Amino acid sequence: MKRNIIAIGGGKIMVPANREPQTSLIDQSIVQQAKRKSPRVLFIPTASEDNRDYCDAFRNQYEGRLGCSVQELLLYRDRPSNRKMQMLIAQSDIIYVGGGNTLRMMKLWRKLGVDKCLDKARKRGAVLSGLSAGAICWFRQGNSDSRKFKDETNKTLIKVTGLNYADLLMCPHYDVEKHRQPALKAMMKTTQGIAVGLDNCAALHIKDDKYRILSSKKNKKAYLVYWQRGEYVKQAIMPSEKFKPLIQLIQ
């Protein structure tokens, strides 16, 4: 399958102007994948309901620091026509999806046809990226905290169906949210295949049929998680510049 996905487990991009976002090294890798000067980046903040501060922080990083040309696809505050939406996605070298409520985002995307536009972008070779909800969306399923957005005390994690550009269950924030690991262990007991847990400041980069792990902070990594013959397996995957066959991961 043709794809170029960089899915980030988490990390702060909304930081004071004099501080560098935690994901900067990964952000640089995303921009490099576009292979052109001043790539056109489309930020899709649907999961945060188009949070203005988030949009400003993203623009400060990708336009101010990394020299990209940034546009936003706003589906809550200033929803464009279908034609404008399709044009924004079609003209972008990089698509970056922000964090927030994954379930609500996926429902709205499917209602408006965003999912179909993103698939066209994948097929033409656009870089598909994002953090947390913006990481989950590219995969078959994700380990999501979407319920907390209705009730902050609800720590229940649910499976959310993504765009299925890779046959994995994606789990962000693997190292920083204590309820993630036990919830993923229980979730995988009734889920076929494997999961990838991503620490904050770690990313899974899938390029066509190969993969690697990226990191923007020391000791941040990914984990391959699955059940086999009644035994729970958790295997660390270290960051590397070298790509490996994706089939080694998903099998």
Image (cartoon, rainbow, N blue to C red):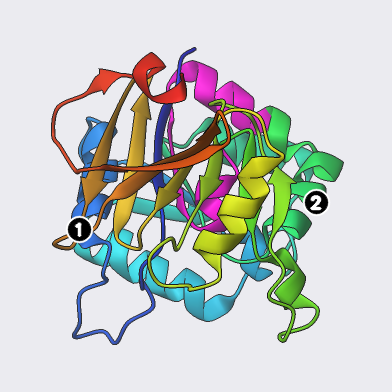
Q: Residue at x 35, y 59 (%)?
A: 199
x and y, in percent, of residue 126 in the image: 43, 29
Q: Residue furthest right?
A: 111
x and y, in percent, of residue 195 in the image: 51, 39
Amino acid carrying mark 1 in the image: Ser
Residue highlighted by disc 1: 216
Question: Magenta segment, which residues?
Answer: 117-138
Q: Is residue 226 above or below residue 63?
A: above
Residue highlighted by disc 2: 108
Which marked residue is nearer to the observer: mark 2 or mark 1? 1
Amino acid carrying mark 2 in the image: Leu
Q: How far is mark 2 from mark 1, CA to CA? A: 31 Å
Crowd class of label 1 (few under 14; some 14 to 19; many from 20; radius 10 Å) = many
Q: Is residue 8 above or below residue 90?
A: below
x and y, in percent, of residue 92 in the image: 46, 37
Q: Which mark is residue 160?
A: none
